[in-house]
Amino acid sequence: MDKAKEQILLEMLSRLGNVVVALSGGVDSSYLLWAALKALGPERVLAVTAVSPVIPSREREAASQIAKMLGARHLFLPTEQMADPEFLANTPERCYLCKRTVFSKLVEFARQEGFQNVAEGSNVDDELDFRPGARAIKELGILSPLKEAGLSKEEIRHLSRLAGLPTWDKPPQSCLATRIPQGKPITVEDLAMVEKAEDFLISLGLKTVRVRHHYPIARIEVGKEEMSKVVERAEDIVSALKAVGYGYVVLDLQGYRPGGV
């Protein structure tokens, strides 16, 4: 069944002529880039990664590595979420406003470069979650080929593994703004604190990590199977996160959960 859906995806992509792939470096967008290159060839595919304080530097590097591995043309595109007062207000519309800014910029850039299509990596499972950003994607006419082919996250992981992509088992990622409690204004300084704290935790070998920003408290979420490692390294973690600027460091015993802020 997975391979049949993959064939549908490849046929769909082959009819596009050319495409800009919004590449985050995660499971879905990496597989979409692989499929686009297979269907269209490297001369008709351009991978573009947004650059903003809301996107961790480690994810930009991950996107660069996967594009290089696949032989894709790859560019970084600065976006302007932090110049939007509505986004900075951190209302329930934050995700919509962010996606609208990013993809508006991407559509404009694609047209300038002679590309008629922009595609992103949503899958069918995303329809089960509350994702305000999906509205912006629809409004701007962005293509979601993985979703159109009926591919689930599990299927994409399986097909990614068959394709030899190192991203097949990558943990879920999200922008740093999701760490800030709704209603608290988003600042560059707060995003930088979160990023530094998460980078340290990831350097310890933790895979699924979120530092929820309740300044002066850092609330750490990790997978339940990784909690013992956090406890074992508690002294180092407290020291590092206090150096970042937090006054208190706590471990959330419920573990990682999407939207846990």
Image: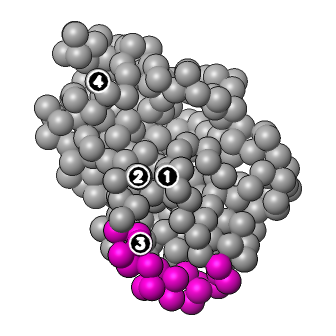
Classify residue 89 by image quadrant.
Answer: bottom right
- Label 4 is placed on what type of residue? Glu
The residue carrying mark 1 is 255
Give how far apart the Cα atoms at labels 1 and 3 are.
13 Å
The residue carrying mark 4 is 155
Q: Is residue 202 left or right of residue 215?
A: left
Q: Residues within 10 Å of mark 4 (few under 14, many from 20)?
A: some
Magenta part, dominant SS: helix
In percent of width and height, residue 167 lies at: 27, 46
In percent of width and height, residue 66 lies at: 28, 51
Q: 71 or 113: nearer the eye?
A: 71
Give how far apart the Cα atoms at labels 4 and 3 are.
34 Å
Q: Is residue 83 visible?
A: no
- Label 2 is placed on what type of residue? Lys
Which span of residues is magenta-colored? 229-248
The residue carrying mark 2 is 224
